[in-house]
Image (cartoon, grey):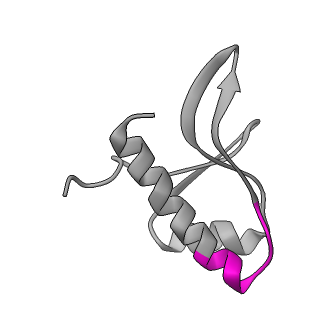
Amino acid sequence: MNFKARKEATEILQVLAKIYEEYISIEVSLGYVKAGTVHNGLVIKSAPPIFTEKLSDMGFSLDITSEGVHVYRIGGLKDE
């Protein structure tokens, strides 16, 4: 996972941790395997709907796939 991908995953995990404190547990994956290839990215495997609503409200994009819900920002993180 490159630096920008790690930074984005860290930011998403911090948001999820904050939401977690207010609600219940979630299951996430920091990457996934598809067709024998390892892919980077944060995937929500199990969570109540409030998690996806809050992430969406905060500007994150969510894609529902067979692996779970992929969470990312369109265009990735801004360079700082």
The residue under the point 64% across, 77% down is: 19
Q: Is residue 20 above or below residue 47?
A: below
Determine the residue located farthest toward the bottom in the rendered image.
22
Q: Is residue 31 above or below residue 24?
A: above
**Residue 28 visible, this angle:** yes
Residue 24 screen position, x and y as percent: 80, 76
- Judging depth in this view, the residue of 53 and 8 nearest the camera is 8
Residue at 36% x, 48% y is 76
Taking the magenta stretch, the answer to whether it contains residue 40 is no
Identify the magenta region.
18-26
At x 59%, y 78%, the residue is 18
Furthest-left residue in this view: 80
Residue 67: % across, % down = 74, 37
Count of numbered circles on the image: 0
Q: Give residue 79's position: percent from left, percent from top.
A: 21, 52
Tell me the quadrant of the picture where the C terminus can be found.
Answer: bottom left
**Rendering quarter of residue 25:** bottom right
Question: Looking at the picture, does residue 4 appear above or below residue 13?
Answer: above
The image quarter in which residue 2 lies: top left
11 left or right, relative to 78: right
- Coordinates of residue 21 in the picture (x, y in percent): 68, 82
Left or right: where does residue 67 sit relative to residue 63? right
Answer whether residue 73 is visible to the viewer in this image: no
